Amino acid sequence: MSLIVQKFGGTSVANTERVQNVARIVTETYKKGNSVVVIVSAQGDTTDDLIEKAAEINPCASKREMDMLLSTGEQISMSLLAMAIQKLGFPVISLTGWQAGMKTDSAYGSARIHEIKTERLEAELDKGKIVIIAGFQGINKYDDITTLGRGGSDTTAVAFAASLKADLCQIYTDVDGVYTADPRIVADAVKLDEISYDEMLELASLGAQVLHNRSVEMAKRYNVNLEVCSSFKDVPGTKVKEVVSVEKMLVRGVTRDNDVARISIIGLPDEPGIAFRIFSLLAQKRINIDIILQSIGRDGTKDLSFTVSNQHLEAALSVLNENLVSFKGKSINYDDKISKVSIVGAGMESNSGVAAKMFEALFEANINIQMISTSEIKISVLIDGSDAERAVKVLHACFKPEI
Amino acid sequence: MSLIVQKFGGTSVANTERVQNVARIVTETYKKGNSVVVIVSAQGDTTDDLIEKAAEINPCASKREMDMLLSTGEQISMSLLAMAIQKLGFPVISLTGWQAGMKTDSAYGSARIHEIKTERLEAELDKGKIVIIAGFQGINKYDDITTLGRGGSDTTAVAFAASLKADLCQIYTDVDGVYTADPRIVADAVKLDEISYDEMLELASLGAQVLHNRSVEMAKRYNVNLEVCSSFKDVPGTKVKEVVSVEKMLVRGVTRDNDVARISIIGLPDEPGIAFRIFSLLAQKRINIDIILQSIGRDGTKDLSFTVSNQHLEAALSVLNENLVSFKGKSINYDDKISKVSIVGAGMESNSGVAAKMFEALFEANINIQMISTSEIKISVLIDGSDAERAVKVLHACFKPEI
């Protein structure tokens, strides 16, 4: 008998039929003699509908009240799922985040998990019950409801799996696993049977929208066996674990991320500390920087380019323009029509030819590279957005023999 | 400075505009220097929509999961109201039932209040905050969410007013007070400036849908000053208090209740204990009996008639038919096309002519009385449903000079 945590996203519980389908998956797992803990997201567009309702009333509502509002979405779907499981004749109980012992800090809207008090949860499991838990939400030390922000339900699932020392944490979604590239772009993309945490982390960060990187980080830290499976097709998914195979494959996947904008500050004086001051200013505004490129310009000045996500572009431009004079910069320009295309694979670190092969393939396809960023297991290039799909296809074809 | 509890029903917060309207009423009260606690119901049809969603999935879902589901309705409306009040620039916080310390028993769907732990609530009031509380919901000793059932938000408001020793508990609704009769039926119905708890209790029990009788009972017990006011019109409402005026008026109001069905068991043996056995059987099934009439039939047998609410008719008939043989009854018949029309007034107890006057007015209008029930401050008659509106008009006209 194993303890299995299963997480179902909003699409998987979007309507009555799908809730019933999830109830079948859960009870099939339970019937095999497993203990089952289920984490659910809000149904379909519920969260967006609630956000819209709030915006109508007060676009600047406090985050505490937003969390109070949004947490109802998961509470609705978890109780409906519990009812569907009761209908099939199985013992079940639904628990809100606070009932399940999910303790967080007080950063409303993007709370971090402090600890999980599993007493209640384990007592219900001991009674033989299937336990349904609201994803995405917890409670802070003031007994106020918090939400974990984007990817919060994946993170909830992994956190409970880690706390309970579950044998497996299955993330059910509307795709049936992790692919070497987006199958909507690359027709012959291959589903991976397994992938390492590090590779999954890079893929997640680089735009593969299967798992949120925060949940992968946590799975890696606590060594949680993850599996990405489909709610709609009964086929094996992709297993995410520490070590994947003895013989490391060169490239695991090709990803594209359109949620990226480049900002360049032109004509900065060539003095020490300038970059530091710029980036600490952006950090104060909680703006995350991705790829950075610094080039020596003419006349003893230099240019500094970096990327931010689109949602932070406006705020970044605003704070930079305000401070341009104090940096002694000449001008600022930006480009939000760009994409980041990456190849990921644990085999890369021991094979220096990968980058050259990648650049060659892009050159032959006449795709101009604006910026480059590398880690031990990934290479990312920044290119024009209109070239992105073509770049993914070209790179996938180029590395396919090695996948 | 006073402490005022204000309760707003589902119609009063049904949409963005109305939520904003409620925010104005609340902040006007706060601006006058009062501490304000607000109890809200779920928006408009939210509760019905959630019930429908649940029925689609499982018509026999456990009441625990139903309460988990339904309690989200008030959580949504309270957070939206808090946001609307923030928009107007006032300090505010919303609290769920459990955060506000509402402790109940475990009768999911119709929980009774055990106690209210007001520490958190009072701490927020001390900080100068307007506190919005979800009506209709609490928490039991297992930390599970419960709902109070019908009229639960009125009851919540009175319970908090009692616990906090509030100076006033205002029930805002879509009518502007308590009338001598339903203004939709009787054009010249008069709004009462004040009414006693006992009279309000009879009116509430007898079909005036302004306040739930459970909340009036509690207000009487804890001596809470109640006021029924309109969310939509800024006019004085009706005050409900212990003693109303030195000179008691004869009749306070005329009510009609269509939610009533008569059941008759024909040909019961004239033995002791039969009625007791029948009513204890119904009590076991939690079926409430209202008016009872026992008549001696022919041949040493008797007939027993009584009324139940429509929702209990089917269950009552079913249990009675199963046991008819053991009661030695001959047959059972019922009528669900009847109405109960009542006159209520604290002055009645000292004036024996009221009943005669009532029966005469109905006789002159050619309305047949099937059953009669009286208390110290009310007289109810059971008549054919098709006569009910006419009876209300006739009685209101008859007693108007004395109202």
Image (cartoon, coloured by chain):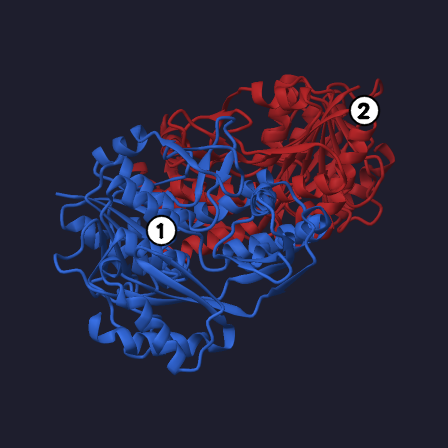
Chain colours: A red, B blue
Q: Amino acid at mark 1?
A: Leu
Q: Pointer 2: residues within 10 angstroms few (<14), some, or many (20+)?
A: few
Residue B383: x and y in percent read: 48, 71
Left/right placement of residue A64 relative to residue A341 reads left
User: Secondary structure beneath disc 2?
Assistant: loop
Along the horizontal axis of the image, is B276 left or right of B366?
Answer: right
Would residue B77 appear left or right of A80 to someone viewing this image?
left
Same chain check for tags 2 and 1: no
* Residue in the image at 84% along x and 35% along y: A236
Q: Looking at the picture, how far across and down is residue B323, in whole percent?
A: 70, 48
Whether residue B82 appears in this view of the structure is no
Tell me: residue B332, above or below residue A381.
below
- The residue lying toward the viewer, choosing from B100 and A389, is B100
Q: Chain of mark 2?
A: A
The residue beneath circle 1 is B81
Q: Quadrant of the C terminus of chain B?
A: bottom left
Q: How many marks?
A: 2
Q: Which mark is residue B256?
A: none
From the viewer's side, name the closer residue of A388 and A222: A222
Q: Is residue A43 above or below residue B129?
A: below
Between B366 and B302, the residue placed more toward the observer is: B302
Q: Residues within 10 Å of mark 1 (few under 14, many from 20)?
A: many
Q: How far apart are the alpha carbons under marks 2 and 1?
A: 46 Å
Tell whether A368 sits left or right of B231: right
Judging by the rendered image, the residue that carries numbered circle 2 is A33
Residue B254: x and y in percent read 34, 68
Write the residue at 52% across / 32% down.
Answer: B144
| Residue B81 visible | yes
- The quarter of the rendered structure image containing the N terminus of chain B is top left
Circle 1 marks a residue in which chain? B
